[in-house]
Image (cartoon, rainbow, N blue to C red):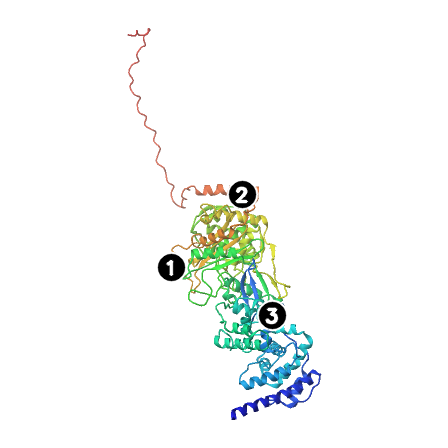
Amino acid sequence: MRSARTGLRTVAQAMVKFLGVSVLAGALAAGLVIPFAGFAGSSTSGVAGSVQDLPVELQTVPLQIRSRILASDGSLIATLYEQNRMPVPLSQVSPIMRKAIIAIEDDRFYQHGALDAKGTLRAMVRNQSEGAVQQGGSSITQQFVKLSLIAKAKTEAEREQATAVTYERKLTELRYAIGVEDQYSKDEILEKYLNLVNFGDGAYGVQAAAQHYFRTSAKNLTLAQAAMLAGVVKNPTGYDPTNDLKRSRERRDVVLRRMAELQVITPKQAAAAIKTQIDLSKLRKVPNGCASSNYPFYCEYAVSKLLENPALGATVKDRDHYLKTGGLTIRTSLDPRIQAAAQASIRSHTKTTDTAVAAITIVQPGSGLVKAMVQSRPYGIGKNQTSYNYNVEKSYDGGYGGFQNGSTMKAFTIAGALEKGLPMNYKINSPSPIDLSGKKFSTCKGTTEDPDYTPKNSTKSGYLTMLEAARNSTNTYFLQLSQRTGLCAPATIAAKLGMYNAQTLGPLDQVVSFTLGVGYTTPLMLSNAYASFAARGKYCAPLVVTSVLDKAGRAIKTPGVNCKQAIRQDVADGVNRVLSAVMEPGGTGGRLNFGRWDLAGKTGTIQDNRAVWFAGYAPNLAAAAVVADATLPYTNLMYRHTLDGEDISDPTGSGTAGPLWKSAMEGALKGLPLRRFAAPTARMVNGTPAQQKAQAEQDKKYELSKKPKKPPVKPGTPPVVPPPVMPPVIPPPPVMPPPVKPPTKPTAQR
């Protein structure tokens, strides 16, 4: 009896409070402000003042909508979001879903205004008598206001204010709700509500929820599915079926019985739906972020470039928020077919357990579009995983910052010499070793020297042309060539083609060994620079993001293809011819040639074999592959390092990195049109008549220098007197027999 009396007293108290609120609601609807004695500790002046200060119209923030990053063919690379939401118009929501949410949350939604006095009183009585919340007390419009204020809150204090259990907050919501009812139709309010509300397990809005739990659309939800979703709304965590399946089913059945009670569905339909199990086998979480992508390293690099775009926000924080909430459609340059070819090469030549790492980037000449980016060590934080992208510069947290690139830098020395007017047949005597200690090399700002520098060749030495030296990667030839042209010429060309220090992001150092690759570079940087040679000297900035559309499909300004003629076409044609010699039989890249393609390339090995490279290109595509030690302190790949599960016994650009490049390019070029390099001019090959004459004279001098010379006579040394020459001894003539007198007549025959 006592408990019954207590329950009745509680209901009575709630009714009194409700009547008070209803009076104030009527005053608000009439545009009046009536001082009202506070409930739950609120003072009259506090409540009246706060209500009086409120604007009538609710200023909402845009819905948080997930963004998508797409490959060049439109396939999905990644989804970015803070709330997994995909808004849909009400016409794309099944009628049974609309009926279910209205039945359990606000069954008189289409009959009342901002406040349903009758429905709220009934819900209050029922909830109080049953000791639990069975029906919602706030109208759908009021709930929309509350959710909007929570979404709008930027600080913790604002969030607490938007969710505070006070009559002051209720009155705030009510005044806003009146404005919403005046501003929008009932269907518009219901649509906004269904797209805003949290349906549990990270699914916001009815479309995302339908996809998440049932792999269907909001338009195709069944009765049982709709009832489950409608039931979750009251408590997105408690009624989430992934948290408590039994409780979620019980809540769903409450919705179904309420729908039958309101005659929205028949008792038979309700009974059939109640028998239906909640099937979570189709549950599909939408992967969030690049870590869940099939192309995580490429994806993170694309995001890093998006965060540099001021069109997406004033600060990096603003841009990051917009990327995850703006419903953007981001198209990239990644080509899944070419990416697959590069990845297949990685799988064929490496293992994830290798101590050495391998990386490949493929770029399109003439556009700078980055078509593929792969590496041997997978994304992650576990054993044999990494979050570093070995293909790119250290411009963001995931950028590794490259490796020294060895003799691949000789390409820029070749370009510098050709630009200076030296022909491909220019010869230099290139012994091994050669002493360059203290020899001055001019730079863009003066001169430089190395006090102790005696480099040597690992391949052919001798009196070589530029073509022969490139074919054999003769170090002492290119060191002397860079001394004759000066370091400013190749360094300037390298900079024009996008080369810089991938660690410091500053210019490459102009040092004596510049042509042997002492700076840090990346596969992306080098492949794009070589792509400029393939494009006949046209440099294009590397491009990963090709377009960005907002949620309405409007284009957002983003850097596009950005190309310029960096070096003369005839110079690039000359470089292509010289580097093609590398791919010919006997060249360091001769074993890497394939098919009928015009190919050019260059090997690279750094000091102590800590990294080996091969960079090369066809007119259609350019690629750079590197195999390196990526764990400090860096050590020689020849010792205790593995690739494809085997010890690296002889690390070279052609034999170690080259096969990765070859198989990637073979696959990438399949199906592309066969194109040819432009032939270099005769002057680029042989030089001017004056240069040819000078070369001929130099050749003669070199030939003469090869002949043995008489030893020099030291001062004060008496001359060597040769022995006297004796006349030859002439032997006496031989004694001959006397001559026989011939017969006067022929002798008769017998």
Instruction: Provide residue 71's location: percent of width, then percent of height.
Output: 55, 60
Q: Are marks 2 and 3 in contact (CB under 8 Å)?
A: no
Q: Quadrant of residue 317?
A: bottom right
247 up-or-down from 532: above or below? below
Residue tagged 3: 95
Mark positioned earlier in the residue sequence (2 or 3) = 3
Number of other residues with Cα within 10 Å of mark 1, as a class: few under 14, some 14 to 19, many 20 or more: some
Q: Nearer the viewer, residue 196 or 511?
A: 196
Residue tagged 1: 639
Disc number lying in front (1 or 3) = 3
Q: Nearer the viewer, residue 57 or 107?
A: 107
Q: CA distance from mark 1 to mark 2?
A: 48 Å
Residue tagged 2: 694
Mark positioned earlier in the residue sequence (1 or 3) = 3
Q: Quadrant of residue 148?
A: bottom right
Three-letter amino acid code of the residue under disc 2:
Ala
318 up-or-down from 411: above or below? below
Three-letter amino acid code of the residue under disc 1:
Tyr
Q: Are marks 1 and 2 in contact (CB under 8 Å)?
A: no
Number of other residues with Cα within 10 Å of mark 3, as a class: few under 14, some 14 to 19, many 20 or more: some
Q: Quadrant of the C terminus?
A: top left
Can residue 296 be seen here? The reply is: yes
Q: Nearer the viewer, residue 175 or 602?
A: 175
- Taking the image as shown, residue 323 lies to the left or right of residue 630, namely right
Three-letter amino acid code of the residue under disc 3:
Pro
Q: CA distance from mark 2 to mark 3?
A: 91 Å
